Image (tube, rainbow, N blue to C red):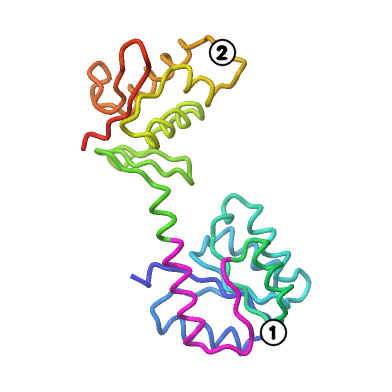
Amino acid sequence: MNNDIKILIVDDEEHIRELLKFNLEKNKYKVICADNGNDAVQLAASETPNLILLDLMLPGMDGYDVCKEIRKNSLTANIPVVMITAKGEEFDKILGLELGADDYITKPFSVRELVARVKAVLRRTNMKQEENKFAFGEIIIDFDKHQVKKNGEGVELTLKEFELLSILCRNKGRVMTREYLLDKIWGYEYVGETRTVDVHIRHLRKKIENDDKNPKYIQTVRGIGYRFNSGE
């Protein structure tokens, strides 16, 4: 439902803000507005909108700097940004995209086109988010957020445990040797210390398996290493 999607409009021209707000709300989006760059950065962090429509020519902090600040903050780094500006030169577009904008639309624009662009960017973002999640049994892993949930409840994993689970999941069905896992996660300083992998696997099983003595997901391949089985 679009009612659950929040869009931040950043433009110093009131009639543009009102025009966009009216048309986006007509399409069932929730809308919040800012008329300057500083407020935009603060609202992006406090409201975490699903998408930002960002004018480049703003008083004080311009749109380029706003985009930089949004991309630097872990809370807002992944929010898609559509830049809106009167500047139509290729250089301006390239600079905006290089700074992390997801799309670019030039004034004057058709409202129908802008709404279509918004829908397209949101669709691409949703697809990307789904690709960066992995579900098996009662477990959901969100790779972007470094979160693991079991039956809807958060599971506290250490960084190494999360990295270990991620590698195993991304290589579902393949046998990962202890040496390979050790090298990829701990690096050369731990060469030969394969017991480190076993200890972390044991802790990981206790947190995600229903019966860590008879594991369903992280299976031991005797004498070699481990294999992830999603239980499908």
Front one among 103 and 137: 103
Front one among 207 and 219: 219
Image spot of residue 70 (x, y percent): 64, 59
- Residue range in magenta is 102-125
Looking at the image, is 25 positioned above or below residue 51? Answer: below
Q: Residue at x 48, y 74 (%)?
A: 118
N-terminal label among 1 and 2? 1
Residue corresponding to mark 2: 191
- Majority secondary structure in the magenta region: helix
Q: Residue at x 58, y 83 (%)?
A: 17
- Left or right: 99 in relation to 180: right
Q: Quadrant of the C terminus?
A: top left
- Left or right: 160 in relation to 42: left
Furthest-right residue in this view: 60
- Left or right: 228 in relation to 195: left
Crowd class of label 2 (few under 14; some 14 to 19; many from 20; radius 10 Å): few
| Residue 86: image tag | 1
Image spot of residue 153 (x, y percent): 33, 39
Q: Secondary structure at mark 1?
A: loop
Image spot of residue 92 (x, y percent): 72, 73
- Mark 1 or 2, closer to the camera: 2
